[in-house]
Image (cartoon, rainbow, N blue to C red):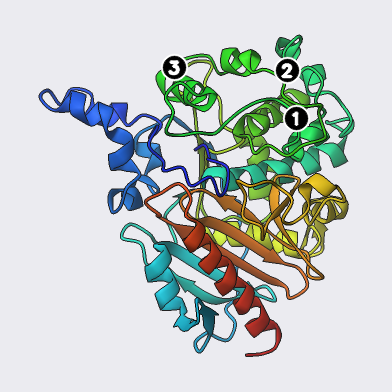
Amino acid sequence: MLEVAMGTGTRRAGGALALGAAVAGLGAGAGWLWRHQADLAFSRPLNEWTFTHMSAVLPTRPVARAAVPRPLPYGPALRAFTYEHDGERRTLAQLHARTHTTGFAVLHRGALVREEYPGRFASPRARFQLFSLTKSVTSMLVGIALEEGALGSLDDKAAGYLPDLAGSAYDGPTVGDLLHMSSGVEFTEDYADPASSFARFERAVSGGGSLLEVVRSLPRAARPGTTFTYSTVDSQVLGWVLEAATGTALAQYAHSRLWSRVGAERDAYYFLTRGRPRTALGGGSFNAAVRDLARLGLVMARGGQLDGRQIVPARWVERSRGADLAHLAVGALGADAPRHYGYANQWWTLGGARRAFTGIGIHGQYLWVDPQADVVVVKTSAWDTAEDEGRDAETVAALTALVTYLETGG
């Protein structure tokens, strides 16, 4: 799924990525359902079903689980934790109720200390739509491809791998520019404006149009590498670059380089565009179980290693914790982004001495990684808006306090 830039305040009103299969043939009322599918599918409480059943409404490609799942041992249960927000002391149960948590897991020193599924359709077996948390998974795969030599360099031009982009605004930005959301290509993720470039992109995804045509039509707004503009299209092009460089579909590469190596216990999947050739969205169509996301987070918390095996390059993990670039620093992303975030390598960074970082998806998806404390938190949610500054701020406050609690022994 695609994501509005963090902090715009835009209500998700433009696109459920086609529940057309669900409404076709219903006769009377089908037209009304078609026109209002976004409001229905992404508003509470129906969104709890939508976010765990994307495979029922769109084509998919599986990411097969590991032949032998890696156990997640249990540690001392996390029970007494509270956090403070808005002058009140609150519990995790209150966090879940206030922020519509559907799945939640906490790893401390590699052990599960909390796991719960407050969502109506949530369970350890459910695969959750991760929206733009997908981007962070794509980043991990790019780092692996670079280490293996399939990708030559971060300084390689994206169009060098994708000749169809020659002459477009994407003929110039490097792989590194895409990773930092600094392509300089104009793209506004406005869900409410049916005439926006985002709306055209989304219609191509859900209605069978050409993504390439939309991408090629976008103008250049800035010199590559100089400004931050949150753009799912940057991530889409990055996914295409990865597939071209490796000669492998995104789902297969995710299986062979991540899912099989981290010991995933459940198949994941990408949903695909309706039009052919069908393609996964490197910026937003990954669906996975909470425990398997925790395994990915554990890799990132431990410098790319798991059980003595280097899965993601250590230098790639370091790059994801923060970039030494002024326009990507915490608080410098612009008026549309909360000031507690920076950005690097398709991850949201938290700065400070800890240099923790998190993947984020709209409607409240988080993969929170604090290497210093060896803590990973997965939180899936079903907000009824694409973004919510209040719920995001409370989640950040709660997870920050949780890391401190665990690190200091409660």
**Alpha carbon of mark 2 to alpha carbon of mark 1: how far?**
9 Å
- Residue 69 shows up from this direction: no
Q: Earlier in the sequence, mark 2 or mark 1?
A: 2
Looking at the picture, which amino acid does disc 3 mark? Gly
Please state if 233 lies on the left or on the right of 274 as rendered.
right
Whether residues under marks 2 and 1 lie with C-beta atoms below 8 angstroms apart, the answer is yes
Please state if 271 lies on the left or on the right of 48 as rendered.
right
Residue closer to the observer: 340 or 360: 340
* Residue at x 78%, y 73% (from the top left corner): 372
Give the SS element for disc 2. Answer: loop
Residue closer to the observer: 307 or 240: 240
Looking at the picture, which amino acid does disc 1 mark? Ser
Q: Position of residue 205 (x, y in %)?
A: 48, 24
* Residue at x 42%, y 54% (from the top left corner): 126
Question: Which quadrant of the view contains residue 226?
Answer: top right
Determine which residue is flagged by label 1.
Answer: 183
Q: Position of residue 212 (x, y in %)?
A: 60, 15
Total marks placed: 3
Whether residues under marks 3 and 2 lie with C-beta atoms below 8 angstroms apart, the answer is no
Residue closer to the observer: 403 or 194: 194
Determine which residue is flagged by label 2.
Answer: 169
Callout 2 environment at 10 Å: few (<14), some (14 to 19), or many (20+)? Answer: many
Give the SS element for disc 3. Answer: loop
Determine which residue is flagged by label 3.
Answer: 208
Residue 155 has which mark?
Answer: none
* Residue at x 57%, y 48% (from the top left corner): 6
- Closer to the observer: label 3 or label 2? 2
**Alpha carbon of mark 3 to alpha carbon of mark 2: how far?**
23 Å
* Residue at x 30%, y 40% (from the top left corner): 39
Looking at the picture, which amino acid does disc 2 mark? Ala
**Alpha carbon of mark 3 to alpha carbon of mark 1: how far?**
26 Å
Q: Is residue 123 above or below residue 191?
A: below
